[in-house]
């Protein structure tokens, strides 16, 4: 097992260097109980972490609320809370590109409103 962990280290370092920051997305929260199957993330491009944000060592979290439509697209994204307003725009731009397998109710895709937290952390503090 130790060899497998060691062999992943270069990959993790490369990913951190490529992204310059590793924003993390938690699973969608507060999924309505009326659905039979919760939506599943298919694609979640990371928010851009600009040079200015990295230079100023801005870290924090943004909680965003949005609708996952019956076709799996994101609609009506809005910031619920933020630790730094400079993180809001990159979060909203990224979330608008996310795609999901929609929630299912009675065998049919349905729209759902969800909350999701996006965390911005400098690679050295992960």
Image: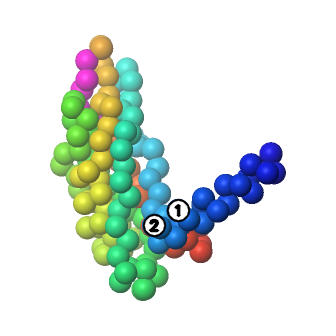
Mark 2: few/some/many CA within 10 Å (<14, 14-19, 20+): some
Residue range highlighted in magenta: 108-112
In depth, the one of 106 and 30 nearer the eye is 106
Residue 20, image x and y in percent?
A: 47, 72
In depth, the one of 90 and 76 nearer the eye is 90
Residue at horizontal 46%, vertical 49%? 26
Q: Is residue 103 magenta?
A: no
Q: What element carries label 2?
A: helix
Tell me the quarter of the picture where residue 27 sits: top left
Residue at horizontal 35%, vertical 83%? 52
Work out whether 119 lies above or below 74: below
Q: In which quarter of the image is the N terminus?
A: top right
Judged left or right of residue 72, residue 30 is right
Q: What element carries label 1?
A: helix
Residue 114, image x and y in percent?
A: 32, 42
| Mark identifier at residue 115 | none
Residue marked by disc 1: 15
Residue at horizontal 26%, vertical 47%? 66
Q: Are the two marked residues, 2 and 1, in contact with CB atoms closer than 8 angstroms?
A: yes
Residue marked by disc 2: 19
Q: Which residue lies furthest to the left in this view?
A: 76
How many numbered marks appear? 2
Work out whether 12 lies above or below 50: above
Q: Does the magenta stretch include residue 110?
A: yes
Q: Distance between the residues labelled 2 and 1?
A: 6 Å
Tell me the quarter of the picture where residue 70 sits: top left
Residue 33, image x and y in percent?
A: 37, 27
Mark 1: few/some/many CA within 10 Å (<14, 14-19, 20+): some
- On the question of residue 34 being in view, the answer is no
Work out whether 47 lies above or below 3: below
Q: Quadrant of the C terminus?
A: bottom right
- On the question of residue 60 being in view, the answer is yes
């Amino acid at each position: 097992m130790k060899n497998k962990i060691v062999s992943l280290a270069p990959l993790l370092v490369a990913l951190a260097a490529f992204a310059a920051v590793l924003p993390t997305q938690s699973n969608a929260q507060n999924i309505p109980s009326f659905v039979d199957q919760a939506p599943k993330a298919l694609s979640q491009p990371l928010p851009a972490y600009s040079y200015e944000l990295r230079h100023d060592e801005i870290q924090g979290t943004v909680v965003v609320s949005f609708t996952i439509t019956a076709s799996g697209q994101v609609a009506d994204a809005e910031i619920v809370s933020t630790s730094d307003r400079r993180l809001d725009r990159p979060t909203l731009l990224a979330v608008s590109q996310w795609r999901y397998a929609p929630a299912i109710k009675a065998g049919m895709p349905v729209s759902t409103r969800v909350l999701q937290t996006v965390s911005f952390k400098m690679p050295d503090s992960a």
